[in-house]
Image: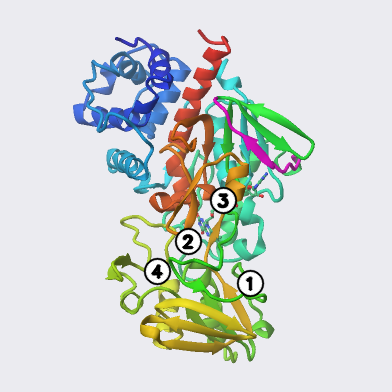
Amino acid sequence: MKHQTALSFLRRVASPYAGDQRAYIVPALREFFTMKDFPLEALVAPNTTINYAISECLFRRASDFISTSSSFIAASASTDLNITLPISKYLSTPEQNIDIDRSMTLHNKGGSSFIGIGAAASIVARAFVEAPVRDTPIGIIGRGAAGILTFAYLKKMGFRNIAIYEKKHDLGIWAQPNVNRGTKNNPRTLNFNGDPALAQAAGDGTKDGIHVKNFLDLVSTNNIPGFHEAEKRVISVIEPGQLNHKIHFDDGTRSFPILINAAGTGKPRSYYDSTRMAYDGHSSGPSQAVRWQQAELSRDDMQGKRFLIVGLGNSAIEMIAQLNEGRRKGINVDYRVATHYPRDSIYNPETTVSSRGRPFRIFRDLSAPDLTGFQGDLDRSRYDYYRALTEDRIIYDVRGWNVVGHGASFECQKGKRQNYSYDRLYVLTGYEQSEAQLEQWGITSKVEDGKHVPQYEYDGEFVTRYGNRHKGYFGIGALMDAPHNRNAVVIPGMMFRLPDLAFSVIMRAIEWNIEQKKLT
Ligand SMILES: Cc1cc2nc3c(=O)[nH]c(=O)nc-3n(C[C@H](O)[C@H](O)[C@H](O)COP(=O)(O)OP(=O)(O)OC[C@H]3O[C@@H](n4cnc5c(N)ncnc54)[C@H](O)[C@@H]3O)c2cc1C
C-alpha cells in the first residue's frame, strides 16, 4: 500500500491498527534517512505546511530536511522503505522507551543540539500546521517550565486554540524565592525556539537561579497572551478517554481531544524510603524538618547553630555551600550531611562503584547523561563536596534513622550507630506526585525504585492500566520523573521530549479532525 501524501501516511500511523508500530516508525525513519544518505533535493513533493510540521518533528533540526522531504517519507513509509522494525509490538515498556531514546540520540549525535540520551540543548519549532488541524482544542495543566515550553512550542507550530490552567504560581517552582535565589545547574547553554538563550551554569557559586526565572518569564510573555493576568484554576479530577478528556474545576468541567498534563514537581517524598534511608520514627516524620532548600541563610540563621541535612543531592549542596561560606567568614556553625551512599562511593564520587549488589555514583555523569544527579561537574559544588568530606561531615552508608527531640540517631552499615544533635533539620530527599493524586488525574502508576511512576509511552502519551493508550492524553516535565527517564525533570529533558510530543499531538489532532469529519 502506497501513501502519497504525508497526511495519508499519518492517517495510517495514527490509525488504531497501526498504533503499536507508531513509536518505532519515528526513530526507524530517522535512522533510515541517515543510512541511505539521500540527497535532500531528490525528495520532491508538494510543500504543505503539515508536511513541513511532520518533517520538523521527525528530524528535529531544520538543516536535516527540506520542506518537501516528508512526502517522500509518506510515499514510501511502509513497504517501500523496507524498514525492519526492531520488534513486532510496541508495549511502551521502559526498556523499549530507552531504546527509542537511544535511537533518536544516535541519529542526532552529530548535531550540537543534543546533550545526550534524554536531553537536548536546542530545539526550534519552525514548522506550521494548517487549518483545521491548528484549531484543535488543546488543554495544558500547569504553567511551570513544562507547561510554558509546551504552550510556546505548539503555538509556534500554528496551534491556536490552547487553554492553559494554573492553580497557584505562574512559572511553577521557579516563582519560589528559595529556588530562584539559588543556583541553576544546566551544564550547557539552552536554546529554545529562537527566544534568548538560557546561559549555562556559571558553576562558580554565583546565585544564577534568577536566569531560569527570567528565561521562563520571557518565553511566557513572548508566547502566552495575557500570561500574568490569566485566570487561576485548580484541576481536581481528570477523566481521560479516547481523544476526549474531561477535566473538572471547582465550578465546572471542560473536555479536550488533546490534554497535556504538566502539573509538575508535587510534594516532598515520604520519609519512609526503604530504597535509601528509611526513617524509623513517628509516622508524620520529625516535626521541625524543613523540606525545601533555603537559598539565603543569614549570619543570624547560622551563628552558633548545628545543621543536619538529610540527603546528598543538589538541594543539599545548595545548603552546604552556604554553611562552608559562613565558616570561611568566621561564623561559628557546625553541620553534618547524612546519606545512604556507601563509603566507597563517598570517597570516589566521580566513578560508579558497586555495593550491596547495586551501582552507586554520586556526581552526575554528563556522558550518560544524568542531569539530575549531584552537580559535581560544577567547580564550586565539587569544592564544597570535598571540603565537607575532608572535614568528616558526611555520615554515609545510613540504612535507617530516627529523631528524638533535637537528637538524630543513624543506623549505619554493620550495625554501627552515629548520633548528632542539631538546631535545624533539612530533609532534602526529592519530590513526587502521590499515587492518589495521579489516580485522580486518571494516570496509572507503578512503584519503581520506591516511587510512584506514571506509565507512559516514549512521547509522553499515558497508558491505561490494561496497557492501552489514552489517545491524546500526554504528560511532560517533572510529573514524568521515572528511573528510565530521569531527565524528564529538568529543562533539557523537557526539550528532548517536546518534538516527539508535538509530533504525536499533530497526529492525534489529525485523527480527531478526521473523526469529526472536518478533514477527509
Ligand atoms: C530546588 C530545585 C532546583 C532545580 N534546579 C534546576 C536547574 O537549575 N535546572 C533545571 O533544568 N531544572 C532544575 N530543577 C528541576 C525542576 O523540576 C525544573 O526546572 C522545572 O521547574 C519543572 O517544571 P514543571 O513545569 O515540570 O513543574 P513545576 O515547576 O512544579 O510546575 C507545575 C505547575 O503546575 C501547577 N499545578 C499543579 N497541579 C495543578 C492542578 N491540579 N491544577 C492546575 N495547576 C496545577 C503548579 O501550581 C505549578 O505551577 C530544580 C528543581 C528543584 C526542586
Is residue 128 at all visible to an observer of this figure? no
Q: 302 left or right of 99? A: right
For residue 435, which numbered disc appears in the image? 3
Q: Which residue is mark 1?
A: 290
Q: Is residue 453 magenta?
A: no
Crowdedness of circle 4 by 10 Å Cα count: few (<14), some, many (20+)? many
Q: Residue at x 25, y 33 (%)?
A: 86
Q: Earlier in the sequence, mark 4 or mark 2?
A: 2
Q: Which mark is residue 181?
A: none
Residue kind at label 2, given as amino acid type? Asn
Sequence-wise, which precedes: disc 3 or disc 4? 4
Q: In the image, what residue occupies the spot 33% across and 74% down?
A: 345
Report the Cα–Cα distance between label 4 and label 2: 10 Å
For mark 2, give the secondary structure. Answer: loop
Residue type at the position of mark 4: Gly
| Residue 185 tag number | 2
Specify start and end residues of the magenta stretch as a single range.
230-242
Nearer the N terminus, badge 4 or badge 1? 1
Whether 382 is drawn above or below 435: the answer is below
